[in-house]
Image (cartoon, helix red, strand yellow):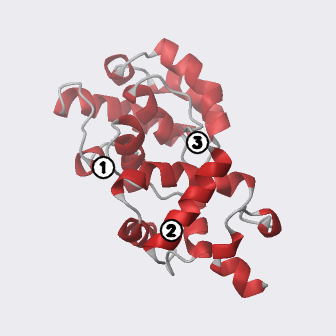
């Protein structure tokens, strides 16, 4: 992928979707972090459906660290894998309190030490929460990057590397959010709407099948 082609793709998606905000509902980095962990293998809508009650009951890391797992499980049950997720977010909160003096880390490697936080989640927290350059690769981003021709790989770390190699750091967050929006509305996993796609002229997948 050439840098100039990538810039045209991102500009076209931005013209179509505008400023694409995250779909998770949150008010601060505590809520963002917990919501991101809960979003694993479920929809943002499902997460948003439980976090109102979760955050009113446990408004910060300190209160969540002291929560009973059974109580948290009842609140987040509809998100799936709720036992593991409840254990993770309670342990995450306790780790922030004990190891980081109640302050959420601002480095990817430190965030990845928190239970339930992998590279993708850490990049989301860094870019969306702290406004620092990071490009989170989820299933939508990975799929679109491969179809467009940014990468040959399905490995998230390699996809991230290949995207970051041709996209300016200042556009990493925007790219992540635009690719997610495009993946949900047009470039879907099954039956992508290629003929209606605003970036099809640059798409390797579309041109190969034309």
Residue 63, image x and y in percent? 36, 16
Q: Residues within 10 Å of mark 1 (few under 14, many from 20)?
A: some
Say which of marks 3 and 2 sits in front. 2
Q: Quadrant of residue 208?
A: bottom right
Residue 108, image x and y in percent? 28, 49
C-beta proximity under 8 Å, tags 2 and 1: no
Give how far apart the Cα atoms at labels 2 and 1 are. Answer: 29 Å
Say which of marks 2 and 1 sits in front. 2
Instruction: State the residue at coordinates (45%, 32%).
Output: 32
**Secondary structure at numbered mark 3:** loop
In the picture of the structure, the residue carrying the numbered disc 3 is 20
Q: Residues within 10 Å of mark 3 (few under 14, many from 20)?
A: some
Q: Earlier in the sequence, mark 3 or mark 2?
A: 2
Residue 23, image x and y in percent? 60, 37
In the picture of the structure, the residue carrying the numbered disc 1 is 112
**Secondary structure at numbered mark 2:** helix
- Which residue in the rendered view is the most extreme toward the top? 56
Instruction: State the residue at coordinates (38%, 35%).
Output: 129
**Secondary structure at numbered mark 1:** loop
Q: Earlier in the sequence, mark 3 or mark 1?
A: 3
Give how far apart the Cα atoms at labels 3 and 1 are. Answer: 26 Å
Q: Earlier in the sequence, mark 2 or mark 1?
A: 2
Depth order, front residue of 147/118 = 147
Q: Residues within 10 Å of mark 2 (few under 14, many from 20)?
A: some
Task: Check residue 6 in the rendering and tell me which mark sits there, or answer none.
Answer: 2
Mark yes or no: residue 118 visible: no
Residue 30, image x and y in percent? 38, 27
Q: Is residue 10 above or below residue 122?
A: below
């Amino acid at each position: 992928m050439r840098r100039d082609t990538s810039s045209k793709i991102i500009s076209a998606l931005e013209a179509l979707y505008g400023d694409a905000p995250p779909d998770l509902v949150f008010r601060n980095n505590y809520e963002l972090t917990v919501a991101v962990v809960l979003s694993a293998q479920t929809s943002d809508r499902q997460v948003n459906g439980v976090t109102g009650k979760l955050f009113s009951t446990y408004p910060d890391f300190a209160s969540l660290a002291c929560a009973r797992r059974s109580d948290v499980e009842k609140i987040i049950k509809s998100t799936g894998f709720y036992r593991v997720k409840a254990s993770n977010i309670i342990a995450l909160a306790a780790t922030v309190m004990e190891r980081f003096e109640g302050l959420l880390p601002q480095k990817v490697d430190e965030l990845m030490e928190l239970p339930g936080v992998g590279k993708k989640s850490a990049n989301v927290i860094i870019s969306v929460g702290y406004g620092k350059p990071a490009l989170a690769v989820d299933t939508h981003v990975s799929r679109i990057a491969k179809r467009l021709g940014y990468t040959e790989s399905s490995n998230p770390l390699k996809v991230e590397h290949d995207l970051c190699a041709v996209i300016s750091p200042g556009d990493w967050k925007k790219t992540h959010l635009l690719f997610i929006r495009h993946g949900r509305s047009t470039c879907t996993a099954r039956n992508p709407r290629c003929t209606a796609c605003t970036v099809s002229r640059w798409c390797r997948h579309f041109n190969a099948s034309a």
